[in-house]
Amino acid sequence: MTTRTRVAVVGGGAVGLTTAYDLATRGAHVEVFDRGAFGSGSTERAAGIVYDAYAEDVDVALAERAIERFREFSGERDFRLTPAPYLWFTTDGGASAAAIREQAERMRHHGREVELVESDDIRREFPVLRVDDIAVGAIARTAGVADPSAYVALLVRKVREAGATLHSETPASVALDPPRVNDTAYDAVVVTAGAWTKRVLADVAVSVPLRPYRVQALVAGGPSVPIFYDADEEYYVRPHPEGLLAGDGVTDGEADPDDFAEATDDWFREETRRRLRRRLVNADVPLSRSWAGVCAGTPDNDPLLGELADGLYIGAGWGGHGFMRAPALGERLALQVLGERDGVGPFDPTRFGAGDA
Ligand SMILES: Cc1cc2nc3c(=O)[nH]c(=O)nc-3n(C[C@H](O)[C@H](O)[C@H](O)COP(=O)(O)OP(=O)(O)OC[C@H]3O[C@@H](n4cnc5c(N)ncnc54)[C@H](O)[C@@H]3O)c2cc1C
């Protein structure tokens, strides 16, 4: 495609806004549509944890590029990537410990700064943690936290300055042959509608195997903590201006992104605070607020990124890792749309047969 290509981006979360920015700065004529306010999907509910703790080549490369860009953007407007180490650990000396060792080894192989640690090492560096039961852990040094709302505010400004047109509160309806949004034709339409992507693509009878699921998070008072993930109990914690932010994985079953419980469950708040009181030294962790949101995953846990049909592109299916990789995912998508880079092999959105969708 040549410069001044006309592209519509459907969905103005962290990924869509980054894609729009990278398209517009390379000369494309871009319009971004969001059915609500920019960032109001999953992005503004994200915990804002950013790390490079991945084992696969492609994931490591994207995480590295994302962190590089977060750092470049840091200091612009109110956006900041605040460095903080990321610790993950297990109390199980068997398979989980082997998995952490292998992941650290693969990260090191890719040149990432990571250390294997035992309980004494963790106690020395993070006296706030109770660690006697920990069998093994790893610390990734290239990690940090950022405010997803500040990223959205920064990107909205950058997208506008790059000459793109932003339409908030404007639901987009997609059509094909030629690719269209709300009856206007474009050279390409990029759907980055997060957990709503499957629904947007239903307009054009394109079926993708995305499964939305609900996750929960809370902010509580508490001591200064590192970013950490308990691989046995599957919850994460990060430092937060009000104390700490904690969240955990998946509620069983598929969620309806238009009709899910936005308030957290009693069990989540109680269980998370109980875990935190057990893991942190002398911490009461009074609850400030909590919320639920939706993520979308795929059958093989790799995202869908690239061209789905002639002129129709998709970027979705990041699970709980879409914010931290958004600066790299959006850039890759933009370069593919402009024909400047090939797709990311394992993320090929056509890799599933129709039966999986
Ligand atoms: C509680 C929680 C904690 C999380 N923590 C982290 C974390 O610490 N780190 C991390 O990396 N990730 C985290 N995530 C995941 C992260 O939020 C997502 O992966 C990421 O925000 C996805 O961004 P996106 O731009 O793809 O989608 P979204 O931010 O969901 O954007 C999609 C947009 O599409 C719009 N849309 C939908 N339908 C239409 C339509 N028809 N027309 C126009 N617009 C439409 C929506 O309004 C929405 O704004 C967390 C998620 C949750 C819920």
Image (cartoon, rainbow, N blue to C red):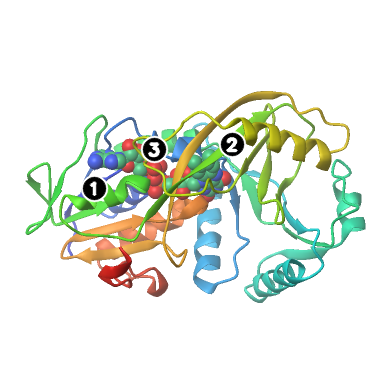
Determine the secondary structure under disc 1: helix
Residue 90, horizontal then vertical, whole percent: 77, 59
What's the CA distance linking mark 3 and mark 1?
A: 14 Å
In this view of the protein, which residue sits in the foreground, 88 or 5?
Answer: 88
| Numbered tag placed on residue 200 in the rendering | 1
Find disc 3 in the rendering and name its residue: 41
Give the residue drawn at x 73%, y 26%: 221
What's the CA distance linking mark 2 and mark 1?
A: 27 Å
Q: Please give left or right for residue 233 compared with residue 70 in the image.
A: right
Q: Please give left or right for residue 204 compared with residue 72 in the image.
A: left
Query: CB of residue at label 3: within 8 Å of ligand 1?
Result: yes
Q: For the residues carrying marks 3 and 2, which lies nearer the camera in this image?
A: 2
Determine the secondary structure under disc 3: loop
Q: Amino acid at mark 2?
A: Ala
Badge 2 or badge 1: first in the primary sequence? 1
Query: CB of residue at label 2: within 8 Å of ligand 1?
Result: yes
Give the residue drawn at x 7%, y 59%: 177
Q: Amino acid at mark 1?
A: Val
Q: Amino acid at mark 3?
A: Gly
Find disc 2 in the rendering and name its residue: 217
Give the residue drawn at x 55%, y 67%: 60
Q: Please give left or right for residue 61 compared with residue 108 in the image.
A: left
| Numbered tag placed on residue 16 in the rendering | none
Quadrant of the drawing holding the C terminus: bottom left
In this view of the protein, which residue sits in the foreground, 44 or 75?
Answer: 44
In this view of the protein, which residue sits in the foreground, 275 or 310?
Answer: 275
- Indicate the quadrant of ligand 1 in the picture: top left
**Does residue 73 appear in the picture of this structure?**
no
Residue 317, horizontal then vertical, whole percent: 40, 56
**Does residue 357 appear in the picture of this structure?**
yes
Badge 3 or badge 2: first in the primary sequence? 3
